[in-house]
């Protein structure tokens, strides 16, 4: 393309490319918020290890949270989820967030990773491993879990 024709083409194309890429400051802010959400999930996991799953879920679930356990009916509401946890402190639950994502407006996001849960039964302790996906919402500057799903890994 001759240089005289290239200049108008660039003038038209450049704003379109910049708009498609987003503003650099918005991308940096989103990257920071994604790292922050992953850190919140890590604090959630540490609280579950220290004080038990019941205390951690009571703090980090929204009042209307939904839990989708594999092979069972979903549990709706923080109260129903907490009541379904076995034991005084709930099961021994450990997890590690491996990825996080935050929406464009920083109002919702997700984390996913691997978990290990140990349930003490009369017949012995049952240990299960799997993957989880947590959907988060941000209200008043705080991230809370709105929905959480698990997928057990067979044979582990």
Image (cartoon, grey):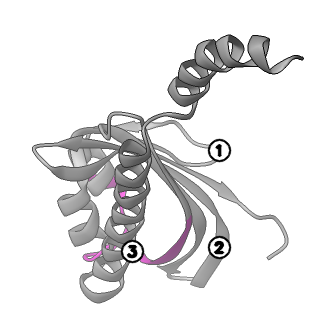
Q: Nearer the viewer, mark 3 or mark 1?
A: 3
Query: Mark 3 — residue?
Result: 42
Residue 4 placement (x, y as % from top left): 76, 14
Which of the two discs, 3 and 2, labels the residue nearer the N terminus? 3
Which residue reaches farthest right? Answer: 1
Q: Is residue 147 visible to us here? A: no
Picture quarter with the N terminus: top right
* Residue at screen point 24% across, 58% down: 60
In which quarter of the view is residue 56 placed? Answer: bottom left
* Residue at screen point 17% across, 53% down: 142
Looking at the picture, tell me which residue is in the foreground, 25 or 116: 25
Which of the two discs, 1 and 2, labels the residue nearer the N terminus? 1
Query: Mark 1 — residue?
Result: 71
Q: Which residues are magenta?
A: 83-98
Are the two marked residues, 3 and 1, in contact with CB atoms closer than 8 angstroms?
no
Q: CA distance from mark 3 to mark 2?
A: 20 Å
Which of the two discs, 3 and 1, labels the residue nearer the N terminus? 3
Magenta span includes 23: no
Residue 33 placement (x, y as % from top left): 34, 55
In which quarter of the view is residue 42 placed? Answer: bottom left
Mark 3, Cα crowd under 10 Å, few <14 / some 14-19 / many 20+, is some
Q: Looking at the image, is 80 positioned above or below residue 43?
A: above
Query: Mark 2 — residue?
Result: 128
């Amino acid at each position: 393309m001759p240089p005289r024709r290239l200049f108008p083409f660039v003038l038209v194309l450049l704003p379109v490319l910049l708009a498609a890429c987003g503003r650099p400051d918005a991308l940096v802010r989103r990257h920071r918020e994604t790292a922050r959400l992953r850190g919140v999930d890590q604090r959630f996991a540490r609280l579950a290890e220290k004080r038990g799953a019941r205390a951690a879920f009571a703090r980090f679930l929204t009042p209307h949270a939904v839990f989708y356990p594999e092979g069972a009916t979903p549990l709706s509401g923080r109260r129903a989820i907490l009541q379904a946890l076995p034991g005084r402190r709930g099961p021994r639950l450990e997890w590690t967030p491996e990825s996080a994502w935050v929406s464009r407006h920083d109002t919702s996001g997700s984390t996913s990773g691997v978990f290990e849960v140990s349930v003490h039964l009369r017949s012995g302790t049952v240990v299960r491993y799997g993957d989880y996906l947590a959907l988060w919402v941000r209200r008043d500057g705080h991230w809370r879990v709105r929905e959480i799903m698990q997928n057990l890994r067979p044979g582990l």
